[in-house]
Amino acid sequence: MSNSKRPSWDEYFLKLAMLVSERATCPRMHCGCVLVRDKRILSTGYNGSIPGGEHCEDVGCQIVDNHCIRTTHAEMNALLQCSIHGISTKGATAFVTNMPCTNCAKALIAAGIIEVVIFSDYHDTLAEDFFMKAGIKLRRIPIPSTNINYDLSKFSSARKIENK
């Protein structure tokens, strides 16, 4: 992060992806994705079960070839949110907590994503090769701070709401 407390755009969107990943329902990996165009958020996604489906954290993972197939990946969920709401992803950037898997990489490419920004790699993926062949820019940056710099004491009228 720069000398000020204000995060760069990359740090900001990756921190949001980290926060989004907290909603993930598969204990094998929590991943978050934020799709952005022109510094505006188009959608977010995290890895979890299909709408209305059972969650891995409740009933266990459904493993095939060492992968949980109950889970829809963060990138797919972010793309599908755009699809549901009629939002084009052409020319957007994907900020993802982990290197996309091969299938998610193919979906991002097909959806018109032009750049992928990550801070963590994923095992056994052809994503990097596919991104390179498709002309998609892949940037790895250091993990952003996990601290949220929010200070209620600077607002005299702000009151902290307590959980009951």
Image: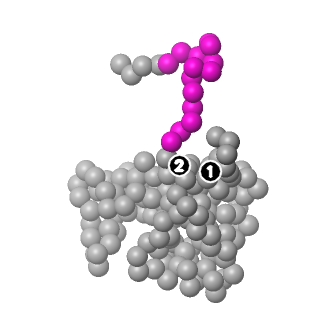
Which residue: 42% across, 19% down?
Answer: 162
Q: Which residues are magenta?
A: 147-160
Q: Identify the residue position indicated by label 1 in the image.
A: 1
Looking at the rendered image, the quarter that the C terminus falls into is top left
What's the CA distance linking mark 1 and mark 2? 8 Å
Mark 2 surroundings within 10 Å by alpha-carbon count, few (fewer than 14), some (14 through 19), many (20 or more): few
What is the basis of the colouring in this image?
Answer: one colour
Mark 1 surroundings within 10 Å by alpha-carbon count, few (fewer than 14), some (14 through 19), many (20 or more): some
- Residue type indicated by callout 1: Met
Q: Secondary structure at mark 2?
A: loop
* Front residue of this view, candidates 76 and 142: 142
Residue 78 visible in the displayed image: no
Q: Are marks 1 and 2 in contact (CB under 8 Å)?
A: yes
Which secondary structure type mostly characterizes the magenta part of the structure?
Answer: loop
- Residue type indicated by callout 2: Ser
**Residue furthest front as drawn:** 3
Q: Identify the residue position indicated by label 2 in the image.
A: 145
